[in-house]
Amino acid sequence: MVTPIVTLTNGVEIPQVGLGVFLMTDEEETVWALKHALKVGYRHFDTAAVYGNEAVLGQTLKDAGIAREELFLTSKVWNDMQGYEKTKQAFLESLEKLQTDYLDLYLIHWHGPYVKDTWRAMEELYQAGKVKAIGVSNFSINHLEAMKEYATIMPMVNQVETHPYFPQDELRAYLEKENIRHESWGPLSQGKSDLLLHPLLAEIGEKYGKTPAQIVLRWHIDRGSIVIPKSVNPGRIHENFELFDFKLNDEDLAAIAKINLETRYGRDPENTGFEW
Ligand SMILES: NC(=O)c1ccc[n+]([C@@H]2O[C@H](COP(=O)([O-])OP(=O)(O)OC[C@H]3O[C@@H](n4cnc5c(N)ncnc54)[C@H](OP(=O)(O)O)[C@@H]3O)[C@@H](O)[C@H]2O)c1
C-alpha cells in the first residue's frame, strides 16, 4: 500500500500518512510496532528528541534494511536545546541516534524565546544539505507573521493539533495562503475525547465499510493535510493505513465540519509557558 504524496514548497515529497511515535516508550513494544508498520507499508516516521525513542527507531529501521531514500524521517528540536549552537548540537544528536546522515524534515517543536537563533541554525542546516526540509510545530498565525521579520527561508511545514473537534480552519487557510503545508498531530484527538464514538463517523463509515478512525484519517487526507496517527496496536496500525481505497465526498466533509467543538486537548501555543 502506498500513501499519497504531499509536495513541499521546495519540491520535497512527503508521504501524506506517517506513523507518529509519541509515547512509544516501551522498547520491546516500540520495536514490534515499528516492524509491523514497516510490513504494512509505512515509510514516514514522526519522532522528536523529547520522545526519547529516536535510537530505537534508528536501530529498528537499520535492522529492517530498508534503503534510506525510501524513508521519510522527521524529528524536532526540544525547548531546552533551542538557540543557535544548541540547535545544531541537538540536530547532530538526533542524526546519531537515528543512525542517519540527514533528516527529511526538522521542526522547531514549540515556539519560544530563542526562536530567532534556533531558526537561523535550522536555515543553515538546510542550506548545508543536512536536512531536506525545515519547519515548525505549534506555531500560531502571530508566530508565523513574526517570522517574516527574521526568516530568510519560511517554514515548509507547520505541525499542529488538528482533528474534527479542532479543525484549525483559520490557521489552515492562512497556511494555504502562505504556501506552508499543514501537518496534523493528535489526528484522532489522542484518545482524549469521545470523537471516535461520534455517531456521524459511524454513519459515514458504514457507507464505505470503514471505521470511525479511518473516516477521521481520511478527512485529514481529503483536506490535504499530512497526518501521523500513532498506534502500538498491530490491528490499528493496519487500520490507520487502510485509507487509500475510498474518498469522502463534499457532503461527508460538510457534515464532519459541523461536529467541530473548537476544543483543543493539548496546550495552546499562544498561551503556553515555554517549559524547559
Ligand atoms: N508536535 C507536537 O507538539 C506533537 C504533539 C503530539 C503528538 N505529535 C505527533 O503526532 C503523532 C500523533 O499524535 P498522538 O500520538 O498524540 O495522538 P493520536 O494519533 O491522535 O492518537 C493516538 C491514540 O489513539 C489510539 N489509536 C490509534 N489508532 C486508533 C484507532 N484506529 N482506533 C482507536 N484508537 C486508536 C492510540 O492507542 P494505541 O497506541 O493503543 O493504538 C493512542 O492512544 C504523535 O505520535 C507524534 O508523532 C506531535
Image (tube, helix red, strand yellow):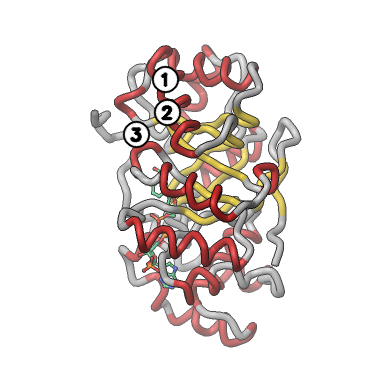
Real-space CA distance between mark 3 and mark 1, rounded to the nearest whole angstrom: 27 Å
Q: Position of residue 97 (x, y in %)?
A: 44, 36
Residue position for label 3? 270
The numbered dot on residue 271 is none
Query: Helix or strand or loop: what does disc 2 sit on?
Result: helix
Residue position for label 2? 93
Callouts 3 and 1 close, C-beta under 8 Å = no
Name the residue: 34% across, 39% down: 50
Judged by depth in the image, the label closer to the viewer, 3 or 2, is 2
Query: Helix or strand or loop: what does disc 3 sit on?
Result: loop
- Three-letter residue code for mark 1: Gln
Q: Nearer the viewer, residue 79 or 42?
A: 42
**Up-down: is 170 above or below 156?**
below
Q: How many marks?
A: 3
Give ligand 1's quarter of the image: bottom left
Q: Position of residue 130 (x, y in %)?
A: 61, 24
- Three-letter residue code for mark 3: Glu
Is the distance from the Cβ of mark 1 to the nearest ligand 1 atom less than 8 Å? no
Real-space CA distance between mark 3 and mark 2, rounded to the nearest whole angstrom: 29 Å
Residue 191 shown left or right of residue 153 in the figure: left
Q: Position of residue 182 (x, y in %)?
A: 57, 44
Real-space CA distance between mark 1 and mark 2, rounded to the nearest whole angstrom: 6 Å
Callouts 1 and 2 close, C-beta under 8 Å = yes
The numbered dot on residue 89 is 1
**Up-down: is 59 above or below 82?**
below
Instruction: Tell me the crowding category of disc 2: few under 14, some 14 to 19, or many 20 or more residues within 10 angstroms, Cα based.
Output: some
Q: Tell me which numbered mark, 3 or 2, is placed earlier along the sequence.
A: 2
Name the residue: 36% across, 61% down: 28
Q: Position of residue 196 (x, y in %)?
A: 42, 74
- Three-letter residue code for mark 2: Glu
